[in-house]
Image: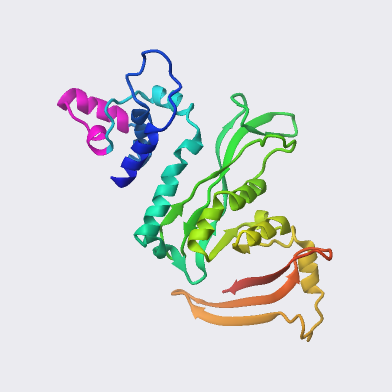
Amino acid sequence: TLLINEVAKTANGVADSRTGKNTQYSMQDFLLSGFSVFFMQSPSFLEYQKSMETKFGMNNARNLFGIKNIPCPEQIRNMLDTVKASDLFPVFQYCFERLIQKKGIEKFKSDLGYLMLLDGTGYFFSRTIHCKNCLTKTDKKGNVTYYHSALTPVLAKPGSEYVLSLVPEYIVPQDGVEKQDCENAAAKRFISGVGKKYVSYLKNVTLLGDDLYCHQPLIEKAKQEGYHCLFVCKPESHTFLYDWISAIPEGEKDYEIKAIKQRIFNGRYHEIITCRYINNIPIKDGKDAILVNWCDMRVVN
């Protein structure tokens, strides 16, 4: 109920692009209708509510979500297209601050503090439909695909099925930048932008991500803003680092690769888990290279 009320409150502050007297449905009706479909996980939810209203004079859309008049799906899509995503960001902040106040945020705390997972996702692809915010990719035949994607950070904890969605960072063409926007650039914007709020509240936050993020500029940006980092580091994209490790002479004390081995029974058969690690090695070539800690884990049946 609190979340629904916050969506309704936020909807009241969203600009209405309509002119004239054709305002049978309020912006609150449109936004709550769109929200209700995801909440109920049913694409036919609103149509079913209309039939309930016709038959019984009542419906769950009004009782549960406070929707006074139910627009049709086409009207909802057309109106939501005019709403800026950032107009709804206060809902994310409300949920986060509510968890802080009620100490529910502590359920997301792990042995490494708070873990913030970074990953990008696509949510629109077309060969014909496009807008000024579209990214593009061209295949070998010269066919252009238009698409939209976003960085969707979440807080998560090992062993827990729940995650906390944080404010997304959209991957869109940036004003004054000739290069096409990318996930890595969006991550830097998030870290230096709204991400500052999260690290100031939670203090001990570690960014987790795939090999895409494991590069010096982003790591430096994250450290500058108070984050820790734990990223995948693939041999094919970090050849210098892996060559550096493989070149360490056997018996070298200053740069010794340490190993921890454990034998466990997983319920069906025994596994041997070997973890190797080494600290303070350069992530890339050059005198300006930052030093990182590296580890790998191998599981043998």
Q: Residue 251, position in %: x, y?
A: 78, 86
Q: Residue 241, position in %: x, y?
A: 77, 66
Question: In the picture, which quadrant includes the C terminus?
Answer: bottom right
Can residue 43 be seen by looking at this rendering? no
Q: Is residue 268 left or right of residue 274?
A: left
Residue ranking furthest to the top: 20
Was residue 123 drawn as part of the magenta stretch in this picture?
no
Q: Is residue 286 left or right of residue 291?
A: right
Residue 29 against residue 238 in the figure, above or below: above
Which residues make up the magenta segment?
A: 45-64
Residue 113 against residue 169 in the figure, above or below: below
> Is residue 4 or residue 121 the one in the foreground?
4
Q: Quadrant of residue 78?
A: top left
Secondary structure mostly seen in the magenta stretch: helix
Q: Residue at x 47, y 30 (%)?
A: 83
Was residue 59 drawn as part of the magenta stretch in this picture?
yes
Q: Residue at x 67, y 53 (%)?
A: 212
- Count of marks placed on residues: 0
Q: Is residue 259 left or right of residue 65?
A: right
> Is residue 14 or residue 184 the one in the foreground?
14
